[in-house]
Amino acid sequence: MKRPMRFRYVGSPAAPSSLQDSAWLSLSAAERLRLREQYAHYLDSIPQCCALNRKATRFCNWLKESGMAG
């Protein structure tokens, strides 16, 4: 009998771990939503991935490139 997969949750869905102490937390919910919507359009232009840590890294890198994070 196969054991069910277990996932360990790391970080916060509202703020990737590398952004927890940055300007990300100072944004309103509406501003964070706007940025995530913009990022979703960017995701349409790059290859998909399944790794959660890679997704968080991509998001952090995109925020840096857009001038949001230091």
Image (cartoon, rainbow, N blue to C red):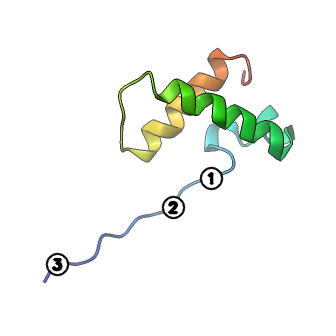
Secondary structure type for disc 2: loop
Amino acid type at mark 2: Tyr
User: Along the polypeptide, which appears first: circle 2 or circle 3?
Assistant: 3
Extreme left residue here?
Answer: 1
Extreme bottom residue here?
Answer: 1
Residue 22 appears in the figure: no
- Residue 39 position, x and y percent, is 60, 30
| Residue at 16%, 78% in the rendered image | 2
Give above or below for 24 relative to 68.
below
Q: Which residue is mark 3?
A: 2
Checking the image for residue 13, the label placed there is 1
- Residue 10 position, x and y percent, is 54, 56
Distance between the alpha carbons at the discs numbered 2 and 3: 22 Å
Q: Which mark is nearer the camera, 2 or 1?
A: 1
Give above or below for 48 relative to 7.
above
Distance between the alpha carbons at the discs numbered 3 and 1: 29 Å
Q: How many marks?
A: 3
Give the quarter of the image for residue 16: top right
| Residue at 40%, 65% in the rendered image | 7
Distance between the alpha carbons at the discs numbered 2 and 1: 10 Å
Residue 41 appears in the figure: yes
| Residue at 56%, 33% in the rendered image | 40
- Residue 50 position, x and y percent, is 36, 44
The answer to whether mark 2 and mark 1 are in CB contact below 8 A is no
